[in-house]
Amino acid sequence: MKFNFIQQHENEFPIKLMCQQLKVARSSYYAYLKRSDEPSKRTEENRVLLEKIKVIFEKHKKRYGSPRIHAVLKQQGETCSLGRVKRIMRAAGLYALSSKKYKPKQDKSEQALLEKKNLLLNADNRPKAINQVWHTDITYIPTDEGWLYLAGVIDSFSKRLVGYAMDDNMQTDLIIQALRSAIKTRKPAKGLIHHSDKGSQYTSYIYQRELKNQHMLSSFTGIGACLDNAIIESFWATLKKELVYPTNFKTRDEARLAIFEYIEVYYNRERLHSSLLYQTPDGFELNLLTKNQLDSCLLNIAA
């Protein structure tokens, strides 16, 4: 309080006189002024941390919120709490891209059929490794030329998009192309569970024959119950929030190129997933492969 009084009246009275009257040392007052002029240590640390946050935020094109940015900072060796990252981002006005929330409808009339056809309702069929359960679906991408239809296949265990195809129509051939691209990449064993909605393309004779030829088991979700296929629905929501909604695609070719880059360069290889303990799908699968190789070596040594 005394130093503040002196600072406020230093143009009216001599500093020496005020210090004598208030019984404070002039050296202490000047030290107070120096401290006031310099930012606090915490303020400076927050400023440096904000710059690092901005680099991550811009690198990921405003797609990362505080949890993922905090995960990246930890990987970089930065010691800070999630709450601190949240506060700094909020103060700087840094918010991740958002989309409208969708509340799925329940289809009670399909419940009996759902229980018979949804193989994933059986806990024994839940994936314990890659290439055990694949989820598939189709979505629409708007362009100035019209819709671009994107069919995708995602691995339930690693969240990796393992196959996809794009075209200006949504006929059965589109989803067959997506399935074959996944098979070519992954070469799964017999008995893989193929889960989809009850769209006409997926229930068609041609597609079901393709699954039978590939020795896959069909599993279907209930009509209107998209949570049964939530893994790929979540991917569509992420794709649209982070790429489609912020972009106005002039042509289908422009959209194809952007989607290819998003999937192959960013989503599978760079984007961290909270459900994978903030690993990328590729990194998660690589760690699984390394662990399996190590386990195999240990078994051979023990034998």
Image (spheres, grey):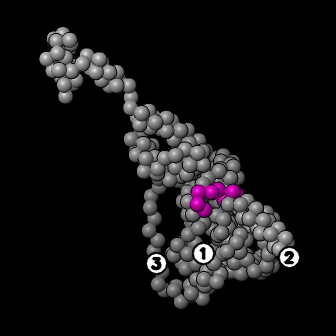
Residue farthest along the top direction in this orientation: 14
Question: Magenta span has 151?
Answer: no
Label 3 CA crowd tier, 10 Å (few <14, some 14–19, many 20+): some
Q: Which residue is mark 2?
A: 303
The N terminus lies in which quarter of the figure? top left
Q: Which mark is residue 197?
A: 1
Image coordinates of residue 10 in percent, x first then y, are: 20, 14
Residue found 60% across the figure and 49% down from its top: 75
| SS at circle 2 | loop
**What span is in magenta?**
276-283
- Is the Cβ of the residue at disc 3 closer than 8 Å to that at disc 1? no
Q: Within the magenta stretch, is there residue 281?
A: yes
Q: Residue at x 64, y 60 (%)?
A: 149
The amino acid sitting under disc 3 is Gln
Amino acid type, callout 2: Ala
Sequence order check: which comes first, mark 2 or mark 3? 3
Q: Is residue 233 left or right of residue 37?
A: right
Residue 180 figure quarter? bottom right
Provide the residue designation for mark 3: 106
